[in-house]
Image (cartoon, coloured by chain):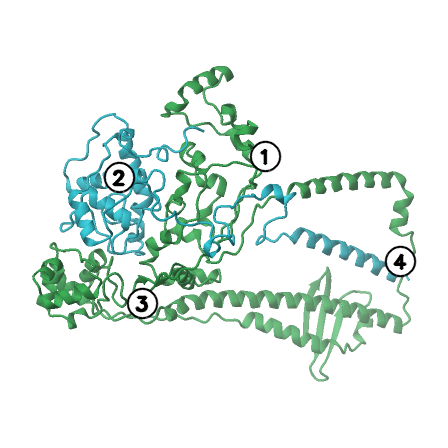
Amino acid sequence: MKTITNMKNSFRIAFVIVASIVMVSCFDSSKPNYQYMPNMYKPVSYETYGEYEIFPGGLEAMLPAEGTIPRGWQPYDYPNTTEGLNLAKAELINPLMVTDKSLANGKQLYDIYCALCHGVNGDGQGILVQREKILGIPSYADPGRLITPGGIYHVQMYGLNSMGSYASQTNELERWQIAQHVMNLKATLEGTPLLAPQSTVPTETVNMDTASGNAVAEH
Amino acid sequence: MYFCAVIFGTKWCVSIDTKSNQLRAKLMDNNITDRMEKVHYRNLPSTLSFLWLALVLTFSVSQTTLATTVVLPAQAVDTAAGEALFKANCAACHKLYKKATGPALFQVGDKYSKEWLYKWIVNSQDLVKSGDAQAVAVFEANNGAVMTAFPQLSTADIDNILAYTYTPQKAPTVPTADVTAVPTTGGGLSNDIILVALALVFLLLVIMLFLVNRTLRHIAEANGVVVEETEKRTPIWKAFIQNQFLVLVAAIFLLLSGAYFAYGWMMQVGVDQGYAPVQPIHYSHRIHAGSNQIDCNYCHSSARRSKHSGIPSLNVCMNCHKSIAEVAPETLAEGQEFGVDYNNEIKKLYTAVGWDEASQAYTGKTEPVKWVRIHNLPDFVYFNHSQHVTVAGQQCQTCHGPVQEMEIMSQFAPLTMGWCITCHRETNVQVEDNAYYDKIHEELSKKYGVDKLTAAQMGGLECGKCHY
């Protein structure tokens, strides 16, 4: 009789232990937690990147309608061809005035987007090249390469050969700022004079949307 | 034969009688030694044989050495120079065994004459314009992609490069990956075996102890020895109920701890800290942001200038993965640790974005990738990435944790209101070089009598800043 009650007790204890372990360990990291009042958490409107039947393919993230120009953008007329590139190299000029601010921004953006391959100094020795992930990145000072601000802008816009387009990651102002920095890097490598900041006139004089460049100062 | 061991403070000896194939367990206790000697314990031999098996297994696992010495054929010096030149100048567009932007260059010297190649490499466009039939054919076969002129390459350089293009393709990387993988998995396996064997040994010891105890009782019974039963006592729960003070204390304790746990449980509802869903394409932040040091803003470029830190569209992946169709063997081996074939994940990307590897062109047939969103604030909260990233200059890691170490992305911060407010109370606003803040900083620092203003003092705790 005695042993039986003991057995029962130990079963109870075991049950409590197992139950508490189950309760503690049941958090499943692959599923989101439950919420109080989910209708306050979830938006009524369509959410960015959401999947809704009304959109073609269910994708909320759509391209802008054909022929429209996003705010802060300007139409770019040079075609994505070799002729377009040569034309841009020849006649497209940087509308941006060289200022300390634009050069600093250009450097910052260059270090984010370009330096991985082209190297912080523009010598084609970025980290991906050093780790032999991507090879054959030329130095900006290579002879046989005609590098002009217009060409830099064109290549950022459309990409060239293995290089992809950076139009989705940068806006017009930023691409011109990067172009200024690249020209400076090239000049440094070749030992020619750098672009000097022309004046303290802010870049806003150029007809370009700078709201995105200045981020959200209004907050 | 005697084997002795000390188990639970008692010295146990096992004697094996080889002739009768019987085994005696002997308790080296002064009092009962003589009783023990009489008994033949019949159940143990089979059990013990397992024990032996386990022991033998444990110690017989020997490390197999797989040292293979690969003797490379002596390389001509010019091939090495050619390799360096190839990697520096050609590899952006050409691979040896596979078409890239330009054609595969393996044994290209057999296809064209050397003289023609010199001219082509130094300035291909001049050759095309001069109307050379072969040049025009090559130019058009590659969709009119213009090959950069290389006037800096001498004919000797080009010879070196051509010598390099005859490097035969290394044996498929799978065996090499296996050679590196076998010792590690072998080591892991033997460790597992040792652990399992040890567990087995302990289990067997416990069973043995139990059996010996039972046998002893049987012997005692058979020999008429009365084993002292513990005297009957009041059950502990009865004694507990009888003590009212103890009941009161226990009740208070239970209520308090219950309240504590209930509070904890209720506070975690709606908090997704640690949420790490399985994504449709296994993307390793560890490799991209950690090993390759790609800036967060490279892919999440809209964090700089908009409310959302966007999920990169697949063209951003293709900026690099147009060139990187497969990972290095060592990276592949790393992936095996996580049970992921990285090359297969790149294939998934190509399918989604509609990139045909063979022709190096987009097919136009795309399919959306259904990424699972991890960080999600409730709809009644306003949060702006650019305000924190660009204006405040916060590191992404402040809120998202050491993402560069995460193989599988998970939510680092609780993203609760208390968490936001703590940070706003502790973080100083970067007002230097920001003319926008000049006036308000002057006024507020006078009002609070401080040099540096926290986000909270700038109004970062006002309800309407985030809830409207």
Which residue type does callout 2 highlight?
A: Trp
* Coordinates of residue B185 in the picture (x, y in percent): 48, 66
A191 and B203: which one is in front? A191
Report the residue marked by disc 1.
B418
Closer to the chain start, of discs 3 and 4, is: 4
Residue at (59%, 64%) from the top-left corner? B195
* Coordinates of residue B229 in the picture (x, y in percent): 89, 61
Report the residue marked by disc 2.
A176
Q: Are marks 3 and 1 in contact (CB under 8 Å)?
A: no
B157 displayed left or right of B96: left
B282 displayed left or right of B154: right
Q: Dot 2 falls on which chain?
A: A
Query: What's the CA distance linking mark 4 and mark 2?
Result: 92 Å
Q: Are marks 1 and 2 in contact (CB under 8 Å)?
A: no
Q: Are marks 1 and 4 on the same chain?
A: yes
For label 4, the SS is loop
Query: What's the CA distance linking mark 2 and mark 3?
Result: 35 Å
For label 1, the SS is helix
Residue at (44%, 40%) from the top-left corner? B396
**Residue most toward the bottom?**
B19
Q: Quadrant of the C terminus of chain B?
A: top right
Report the residue marked by disc 3.
B358
Evaluate whether residue B405 shows in this view.
yes
Closer to the chain start, of discs 1 and 4, is: 4
Numbered disc in front, either 3 or 1: 3
Q: Quadrant of the N terminus of chain B?
A: bottom right
Mark 1 burial class by Cα count in 10 Å: few <14, some 14-19, many 20+:
few
Tell me the number on the disc at residue B230: 4
